[in-house]
């Protein structure tokens, strides 16, 4: 349809981008639809850990501002840290382990602080991963009875409360 609209009307050639949805056929061709349940479990774990990750990222945001400001105070304008926003930019580049090299600390304390920020960057990557992993393991630890909603251990075949057979995802 977008192709025909672009031929008939001028300015509709931007609708050709809609053709990218044809790539969704790959799911059908490669039989990837069977992974929908697994993706739903991951999305549910991300939703369950949303609050914890938000608080963590807010703490990282404030820590980045603090460390960038501290670097501005330590290094000063001689080494390129001419303003607090410039120093915060450097802190973000360093925490994300990108390290462009356009700003480099020269003082001993500045180098120590930058080393600390580099190590902090790896921790920032690891913590959200751990939070989501915990939520994923919570989803897999217990089976809920469809009849009485009682939580049962994963290795149970029948509900400990009412005796109904537990349904398993395959």
Image: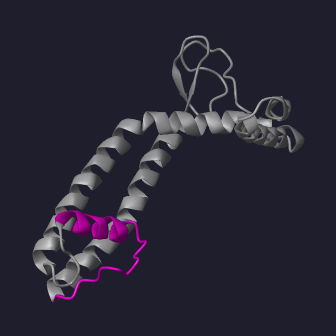
- At 69% from the left and 19% from the top, the residue drawn is 165
Magenta segment range?
84-107
Instruction: Name the one closer to the observer, 155 or 31.
Output: 31
- At 28% from the left and 79% from the top, the residue drawn is 115
Instruction: Name the one closer to the observer, 140 or 110.
Output: 110
Q: How many marks?
A: 0
Figure quadrant of residue 126: bottom left
Protein image colouring? one colour
Looking at the image, which residue sits at the far front?
10
The answer to whether residue 108 is above or below residue 50 is: below
Quadrant position of the N terminus in the picture:
top right
Apparent side of residue 47 relative to residue 70 in the rendered image (left or right):
right
Q: Is residue 138 visible?
A: no
Figure quadrant of residue 143: top right
Instruction: Name the one closer to the observer, 6 or 137.
Output: 6
Quadrant position of the C terminus in the picture:
top right
Looking at the image, which residue sits at the far right?
29
On the image, the x and y values in percent for residue 68 come to 21, 66
- At 81% from the left and 39% from the top, the residue drawn is 22
27 in the magenta segment: no
The answer to whether residue 48 is above or below residue 125 is: above
88 in the magenta segment: yes
- At 40% from the left and 66% from the top, the residue drawn is 96
The answer to whether residue 143 is above or below residue 141 is: above
Apparent side of residue 75 relative to residue 105 in the rendered image (left or right):
left
On the image, the x and y values in percent for residue 61 come to 27, 53
The answer to whether residue 134 is above or below residue 121 is: above
Q: Is residue 98 visible?
A: yes
Figure quadrant of residue 92: bottom left
On the image, the x and y values in percent for residue 84 come to 18, 65
């Amino acid at each position: 349809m977008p192709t025909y609209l672009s031929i008939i009307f001028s300015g509709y050639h931007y609708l050709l981008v809609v053709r990218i949805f044809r790539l969704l056929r790959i799911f059908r061709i490669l039989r990837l639809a069977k992974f929908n349940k697994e993706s739903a479990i991951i999305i549910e774990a991300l939703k369950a850990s949303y609050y914890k990750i938000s608080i963590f990222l807010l703490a990282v945001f404030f820590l980045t501002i603090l460390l960038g400001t501290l670097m501005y105070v330590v290094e000063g304008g001689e080494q390129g840290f001419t303003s607090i926003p410039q120093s915060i930019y450097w802190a973000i580049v360093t925490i994300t382990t990108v390290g462009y090299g356009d700003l480099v600390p020269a003082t001993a304390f500045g180098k120590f602080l930058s080393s600390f920020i580099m190590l902090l960057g790896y921790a920032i990557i690891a913590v959200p991963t751990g939070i989501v992993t915990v939520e994923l393991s919570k989803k897999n630890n217990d089976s809920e009875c469809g009849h009485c909603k009682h939580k049962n251990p994963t290795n149970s075949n029948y509900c400990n409360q009412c005796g109904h057979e537990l349904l398993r995802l395959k």
